[in-house]
Image: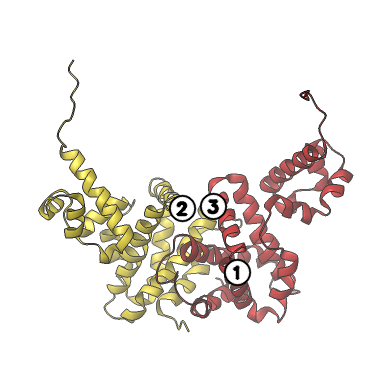
Chain colours: A yellow, B red
């Protein structure tokens, strides 16, 4: 059999080159700062090809993170019912995802990659703080001062990440074995304060 | 030069054997459940030798964790002023330690080891939740219901670990660059609620 040498880049390679450029761009400049045009330039392809393979900027971003859940499905559930119950709904969703046999281990793997690697850390941050929490806050139509949304979103992330780390990864007892309702009752008001309480 | 073969175990080896046994015991049974007697038995030495090398059980525990700060120095400062300001004092101490050029990186290394390794995870948990937070709460002389101390201590740990992970390790902005006073104003009331607030 003849060995192929110097073969031309195929579809799969082009996809991978675009994904690698997107990963770098989202990690360096954040979701908001990265553009399809700049990603296409850095990958050496036409922007139309990026759209052809990945769809929208949001879909391209999700392809770089590969989160176990789709924010487009989550956000409407988090937002339904208004700003008052946002802390509780976000917390209940977060605990369900972590305690689910498929999405739980996937999230733990994502968190471990973020710990091990600077680029993964930034992608996880953009996914979680921007795509999930910030978007949910913004979908509430001005109920939260837009200027305060970024800090409030990362404060909420600090509580949720801390809960994931202590309850599921490091397994601090008695928190690790506490029933979900106990955790929700204890933590939801703190999360809600980060969304709507006085912070200074 | 003659090579020494089959040399008898020296002081250094005995210390290491005791430390390894202590690490396993504290990780498996927790600080409260591990005993000097059992550690000595598992190391194959007399309990008096454990005391001779390491002092008290608490000192032996600290030798296994090697934390960058000594709880015996921290606790009196955390407790001074009573239960009302505990959240703020613990938070200010925690941020100072993380932002200190020597103890900060040491804590990050400890946290990374905990992520990588089951035994380290349990030692960090015992150090942080039991030796620091729980002891500070218990030093307040019944101001907090003793039956609730363990859960409250791990809830406080969830917020502090989450802050460490998002502000210092994964560097979520704008939280990572927020002035210390902003973080204290935002987070201290949430921490205080875990110590003295209604949780259900």
| Of callouts 1 and 3, the N-terminal one | 1
In the image: residue A106, left or right of residue A166 = left
Report the residue at 44% width, 58% height from top. A95
Residue at the disc numbered 3 = B112
For the point 64% across and 80% down, the residue is B85
Where's residue A165, x and y in %?
A: 51, 56
Say left or right for B137 vs A104.
Answer: right
Residue name at image x 15 percent, y 48 percent:
A53
B16 vs A140, nearest the viewer? B16
Which quadrant of the view contains residue A193? bottom left
The numbered mark at residue B94 is 1
Which element type, helix, strand or loop, lies under badge 3? helix
For the view shown, which residue lies furthest in the front direction? B1
* Mark 2: secondary structure: helix
Say whether marks 2 and 1 touch (CB < 8 Å): no
Q: Residues within 10 Å of mark 1 (few under 14, many from 20)?
A: some
| Distance in Å between CA atoms under marks 3 and 2 | 8 Å
- Direction right: furthest residue: B48
Instruction: Identify the disc placed on residue B172.
Output: none
Chain bearing tag 2 is: A
**Residue A143 percent across, percent down from the top left:** 31, 81
Q: Is there one chain holding both mark 3 and mark 2?
A: no
Whether tag 3 and tag 2 are in contact, CB under 8 A, the answer is yes
For disc 3, the chain is: B
Looking at the picture, does residue B124 appear above or below residue B134?
above
Name above or below for residue B168 compared with residue B24. Answer: below
The CA distance from mark 1 to mark 3 is: 17 Å
Is residue B46 in view?
A: yes
Coordinates of residue A62 in the picture (x, y in percent): 27, 54
The residue beneath circle 2 is A115
């Amino acid at each position: 059999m003849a060995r192929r040498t110097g073969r031309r880049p195929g579809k799969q390679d082009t996809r991978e080159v675009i994904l690698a450029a997107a990963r770098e761009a989202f990690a360096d400049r954040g979701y908001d700062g990265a553009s399809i045009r700049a990603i296409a330039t850095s990958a050496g392809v036409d922007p139309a090809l990026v759209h052809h393979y990945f769809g929208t900027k949001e879909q391209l971003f999700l392809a770089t993170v590969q989160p176990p859940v789709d924010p487009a499905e989550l956000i409407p559930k988090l937002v339904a019912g208004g700003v008052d119950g946002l802390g509780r709904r976000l917390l209940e969703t977060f605990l369900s995802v972590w305690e689910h046999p498929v999405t739980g281990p996937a999230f733990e793997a994502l968190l471990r990659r973020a710990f091990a690697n600077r680029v993964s850390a930034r992608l996880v941050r953009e996914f979680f703080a921007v795509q999930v929490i910030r978007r949910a806050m913004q979908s509430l139509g001005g109920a939260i001062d837009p200027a305060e949304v970024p800090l409030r979103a990362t404060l909420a992330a600090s509580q949720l990440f801390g809960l994931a780390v202590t309850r599921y990864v490091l397994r601090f007892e008695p928190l690790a074995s506490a029933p979900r309702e106990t955790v929700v009752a204890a933590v939801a008001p703190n999360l809600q304060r980060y969304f709507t309480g006085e912070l200074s």
